[in-house]
Amino acid sequence: MLCITILTKTRNVSFSSNVTKEVMELQGLSATLTKLVYRFDPDSAPQGRPHVFIYFIRVDNLSDHTVTLRGRRWVLHGKDGRTHVIEGDGIVGEKPRIRPGESYSFNSFHMVACDTSAMGSLHGSDSEGRHILVRIPAFPLQTAPRAE
């Protein structure tokens, strides 16, 4: 389990193996939700999670450093009181390198049972070897009402 303690723009990140490393938010590096598509798919989605949200994210690097993104973390808070944490290596199977002035776009999806709030972060390093984090601002996954 990843634990983040806020220290202004720098963070200490402790992993379950008791390893701690400093993580910083790089000024000028940002992530934006550019599009969100909803689909109700009870036949193809896993049992109990028929609401599919396809999200499109753009990462803009307006900093002075090249960054490499190596992983992601999502926290989904459902209206039903459940919280799901999703972590993994890479960004949709890639570890993108983003130079100053460049952008990187990707899309993926979440499948949920009810209205949910999604917030995330992307993790990696900059050209100086510092561990960096870019937050994906929280956005709602609003399910469409269904006729009974």
Image (tube, grey):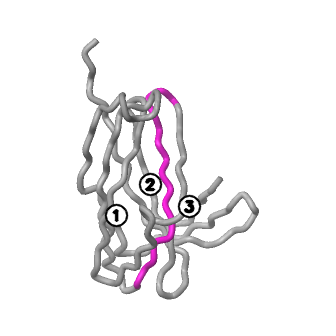
Q: Position of residue 90 (x, y in %)?
A: 49, 66
Residue that carries the numbered disc 3 in the rendered image: 6
In front of the other: 117 or 55:
55
- Distance of mark 2 from mark 3, alpha carbons? 16 Å
Furthest residue in direction front, as rendered: 43
Quarter of the image that includes the C terminus? top left
Q: In this view, does 53 lie above or below 22?
A: above
Q: What element carries label 3?
A: strand
Q: Do the residues labelled 2 and 1 touch (CB within 8 Å)?
A: yes
Any mark on residue 31, and which?
1
* Majority secondary structure of magenta residues: strand
Q: Name the residue under label 2.
A: 120
Q: What residue type is labelled 1?
A: Ala
Residue 91, horizontal then vertical, whole percent: 44, 64
Specify whether residue 77 is painted magenta: yes
Q: Distance between the residues labelled 2 and 1?
A: 10 Å
- Mark closer to the chain start, 2 or 3: 3
Q: Give the range drawn in magenta.
A: 66-81
Q: Where is residue 73 in the image (x, y as percent from the top left)?
A: 50, 56
